[in-house]
Amino acid sequence: QARFGNVPDTLNFILDTGSGGISLDSGTCNEFNIQLQPSDTTIIGIGGKRKVSFAFDQSLSLPGLKVEHLNFHVNDYDVLSSVYGEKVDGIIGYSFFSRYIVKVNFDSSTLEIYTPGKIDYPKQGTMLNPAFTNLPIQWLNIRDRKKLGFNFYIDTGAGLCLLLNEKFVKDSNILLSRRRPVLTQAEGMGGKLQMRLTVIKEVRIGPYKFQSVPTYLYKDDYNVTSYPFTGGLLGNDLLRRFNIVYNYPSREIHLSPNSHFNENFDYAYTGLGIYYEDGKIVVEDVIPGSPADKARFKLGDEVVAVDKNLSLNIQIYKNILQTPNVSLKVIVRRNGI
C-alpha cells in the first residue's frame, strides 16, 4: 500500500520485478481525476502492446519513505483486480527497485527499504548475480525430457511458477513427448488470454530444486520474453518460497528459504478458473476433461461457497481448491438460482 501524489486515499500496488517502470490503473486515474499526458510510448507485455499516457514527475509515499520524480505510465488493471479479489491501483517496478535495496519477507509480510550501500545479507541462503537490463535475468537449470540451462526473467508480478516461450520449447525439445499440455486461461497486461499448461520435472535456481513444477507455455507473438536471449520467466508462486533481498544497485539478489518453501504449488488441479467481478466470484474457465468439467461446472456459474467456506474471498477459495486428491463440495448459483 502507498500514497500517490496528493491523492488522499491509500492505494494498492503490486511489487513487480517484471515491470520496466512504474504505473497506475486507468480506472484509478479517472476516479481521482489524475491529470495525464498522452505519449508515443508503447509498452509490450503478456497479452499485447499499447500506447500509454503518463502522469509525469509524481511522488509515491510509503510509511517512512517518500519517493520523488517518478513518471507513471497508465494501463488498465481491471483483470488483475478480478484475479486478486481487490482493487489493483498500480504496479511498482524498475523505477523504484533501481533506487533502493529492497528486502521482501514473506514470513512476516513486510518490506524493508534501504538506500544503496554495504549491507549484511542473512547468513543462511544463497547469493545470485543476475544480469540486469531493466529486469533481472537469472540462469536456471530445468529438467524434463533432458537437462537444460537457460536465462529467465525474475518476475514477482507473475502469479505463476514458470512460463516458457513456445519457440523455446520447440527449439530446445525440453518437454517429454508424452506430455499433453492442456489449454487454459491466463492473465496478462492486455487482459485474459489462452495458454497451455503442463508440468516440468525439475526447476533449479542456485542450489534449490523444485519438483513437478506447473509451467505455462506462451505463444509470444510480440516476443515479450526476448527469445532467444531468455526462454521465459520465473514467477512469484516459486519466488514467494524465499525471503529475498533485491539489490539492484549492486546487481545482487539474495535468497533465503522460508516457511512457504514446501507448500503446494498453485496449480489448476481442478481445471476451474474463477475471477472476482462486481462482488461475485464467477467461473470463466473450465478445462475440458478436468475434474471441474466432470463435475459439470459451466461458464458464468457464481461460486457461493467452497468446502463450507462462505467468505467470498477468492484467495481463500483458490487455496482450498488447489489441494490435490481431495473431494470438495462447491455451492454455485446458476442463472440467478
Image (spheres, rainbow, N blue to C red):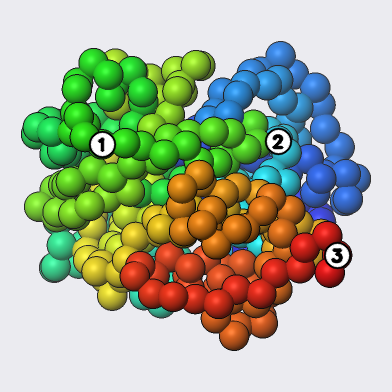
Taking the spot 60% from the left edge, 58% from the top edge, the residue there is: 296
- Mark 2 residue type: Asn
Q: Which residue is mark 1?
A: 179
Q: Residues within 10 Å of mark 2 (few under 14, many from 20)?
A: many
Q: Earlier in the sequence, mark 2 or mark 1?
A: 2
In the visual, does 153 lie left or right of 59? left
Q: Is residue 115 visible?
A: no
Residue for badge 3: 336
- Extreme-bottom residue of the structure: 308
Could you tell me which residue is drawn at 14 percent across and 55 percent down?
A: 208
Rendered image: mark on residue 195: none
Discs 2/1, front: 1
- Residue 17 image offset from top left, x and y in percent: 44, 43
Q: Which residue is mark 2?
A: 75
Q: Position of residue 140 (x, y in %)?
A: 19, 38
Q: Mark 3 to mark 1: distance in Å?
A: 39 Å
